[in-house]
Amino acid sequence: MASKRHLRWIPCAIAVLALTACQNGTGPVNPGPPPPTTFEEPWPEDMSTVWTESFSDGLGDQEALPPEMAGPPYADPVAFPAIDVTEIQLGVRGDFLYMEVRYAGPVPNDIVHVQPDGEIEEQWVTNQGMNIALNTDDDQATGGGGEGVQGIDIFFAVGFDYGVRHNVYANWSFPDSDLHHPEFHMDGELGQGGPGYDFALVRYEISQLPEVFFPIGLEVEIGSWSEAESFDAAGELLYHHFAFDRVIDEGLWFIANGQGDADSRVSSRPNPLGR
Ligand SMILES: [Ca+2]
Ligand SMILES: [Ca+2]
């Protein structure tokens, strides 16, 4: 099934970006993370006025992906509440897309040491990531493949390397359909939450995006998932999908214009998908 074949692309792209950031240049082996991105624009005082869309997801609904999809060969999913998304809220205000992600448990402040227990090997969970992935041109033949959505033209990611840094960013335009090869990248900002908290409030400066990659006033296909990765005692990757939560599957998102004005809705785009 094509969607499964492509499942690992986005998470791997996220991991590759993190590695690139850490291994950039020929200087110190570990130059440390770059300073986090901050925008000058003040955050809205009342975020409840910003949200125009909300996606709820189940609690304790993590999936055990099979080994061929880089999951552990355990009988049941390992409980890892930090990546168990329960809600995503989205809204556009001014130059920014705002997103709040709620988790079933706090994002770890440091690497999580998993003790051996039955079939579960000793391992260390070092990072987590989630994203919303959008087919913004209504063409599943353009962009890359993903889970819950095809033809991804842009994705917005929220990740944490425990004890090191957060990774809030967007990648867009994938001319060779490989999500490892984005034509464009930008960093976003973590406003609240993150390590120690069971939520993350982030924003991305969408004013610099071409309309085809963020069509305000149109409905787009959206998918989303969340995951964590584990390593063994030697520091080798053990399970890319140690924990996995499917959050939005074949969803639709009407990107409202930022003031929640229903009169702004536009529905003139041809609808080849018949929805
Ligand atoms: Ca969930
Ligand atoms: Ca597309």
Image (cartoon, rainbow, N blue to C red):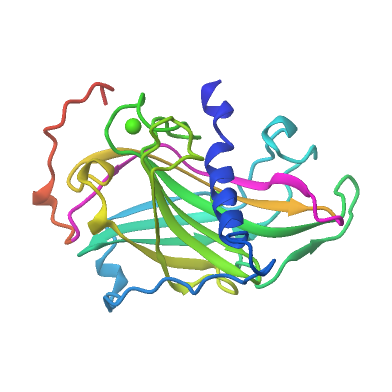
Q: Is residue 250 left or right of residue 96?
A: right
Q: Give the quadrant of the C terminus.
A: top left
Classify residue 94 by image quadrant: bottom left
Q: In which quadrant is the N terminus drawn?
A: top right
Looking at the image, which residue is at 61% across and 55% down?
19
The answer to whether residue 104 is visible is no
Residue 113 in picture, x, y percent from top left: 80, 63
Which residue occupies the extreme left position in the image?
263
Asked if residue 111 lies left or right of residue 226, the reply is right
Q: How many marks?
A: 0
Is the magenta region chiefly helix, strand or loop? strand
Residue shown at the point (59%, 50%) measured from the top left:
15
Give how far across and how far down residue 152 sits, in percent: 39, 36
Left/right of residue 10 with respect to residue 124 in the rendered view: left
Tell me which segment is drawn in magenta: 233-258
Nearer-the-camera pick, 35 or 95: 35
Q: Residue placed at 39% from the left, 30% from the top?
A: 151
Q: Which sits in the foreground, 24 or 127?
A: 24
Q: In screen coordinates, is 222 left or right of 227?
A: left
Whether residue 70 appears in this view of the structure is yes
The single residue placed furthest to the front in the displayed view is 26
Q: Is residue 9 placed above or below 27 in the rendered structure?
A: above
User: Percent from the top left, x then y, of residue 9?
Assistant: 55, 37
Residue 41 place in picture, x, y as percent:
26, 75
Residue 230 within the magenta-colored segment of the rendering: no
- Please tell me in which quarter of the rendered image ligand 2 is found: top left
